[in-house]
Amino acid sequence: AELPAGVYARAGVYDGSSLNGRRTGTRGPDNFLGDDSDRFSVGEVGLEYRLAELDGRLGFGYWRHDGDFPRFDGAVNDSGDGIYLVWDQSLYDDPASPLAVDGFAQYGRADEQVSELASHIGAGVQVTGLIADRPDDLTGLMVSRVDFSDAPGAGFTQDHETALEVFHAVQVTPWMALKPDFQYIVNPGGMGLDDARVATLRGEIAF
């Protein structure tokens, strides 16, 4: 049956056994079909829409990783799974101007008896053409927070890590960009460390 206009559904199945240290190149479909399979499956449904001449997308997904996952209480689960929400929204887009602003928000949750990260929430904006005479440059700002598992045995001394990131990608040529990036991280790793500041310069080549 055909889906209603704007509604979409996608799914994928992948070999997740490399997470457990397996070399997958010569095993063929064994990792999918064997008793100790490590399939990673993900599915998403959502809605793509246009509101006030601006495009947007709202999606909900579920993932499952089959395999043996030790729990913090010493037992073993035969799988791990989680859910996520994503929202992408164009905030400003004028065909007569190179300036464009896009935003996003995301949320994810996993089983904190298995996963060190119990939940994640993030949001940000990306601006194209912020500098008038550099219409292809990208400027971005993002804030994200992860909540660590508070299951006995998880071992975290802090309950969350929060990161603020800002970048500006300079389009040097049509195929190369330089991207200075700065991050400020509160409670890095959830282990009581001092807040961290990280600055990087990345080169990106498209061909």
Image (spheres, grey):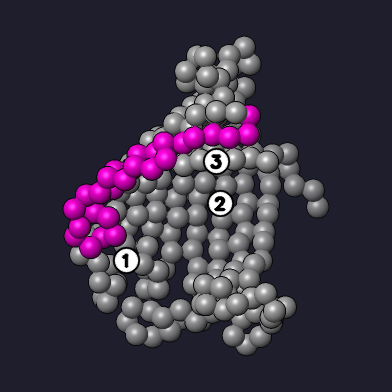
Residue reaching furthest top?
A: 96
51 relative to 26, above or below: above
Q: Quadrant of residue 4?
A: top right
Sequence-wise, the earlier of marks 2 and 3 is 2
In front of the other: label 1 or label 3?
Answer: 3
Residue 160 percent across, percent down from the top left? 28, 56
Q: Which residue is mark 1?
A: 149
Q: Does the magenta-highlighted stretch encompass residue 194?
A: yes
Amino acid marked by disc 2: Phe
Q: Is residue 136 visible?
A: yes
Sequence-wise, the earlier of marks 1 and 3 is 1
Identify the residue shown where x is 62% and y is 22%.
53
* Highlighted magenta segment, given as a residue range: 174-201
**Of the pair 83 and 36, the residue shown nearer to us:** 36
Residue reaching furthest bottom?
A: 35
Q: Secondary structure at mark 1?
A: loop
Q: Quadrant of residue 174?
A: top right
Identify the residue shown where x is 27% and y is 77%.
153
Q: Secondary structure at mark 2?
A: strand
In the picture, measured across the screen, residue 55 lies left or right of residue 138, that is right
Q: Which residue is mark 2?
A: 60
In the picture, measured across the screen, residue 58 lies left or right of residue 184, that is right
Sequence-wise, the earlier of marks 1 and 2 is 2
**Of the pair 102 and 192, the residue shown nearer to us:** 192
Q: Residues within 10 Å of mark 2 (few under 14, many from 20)?
A: some
Q: Which residue is mark 3?
A: 204
Residues under labels 2 and 3: Cα distance? 31 Å
Amino acid marked by disc 3: Glu
Residues under labels 1 and 2: Cα distance? 23 Å
Q: Does the magenta-highlighted stretch encompass residue 135?
A: no
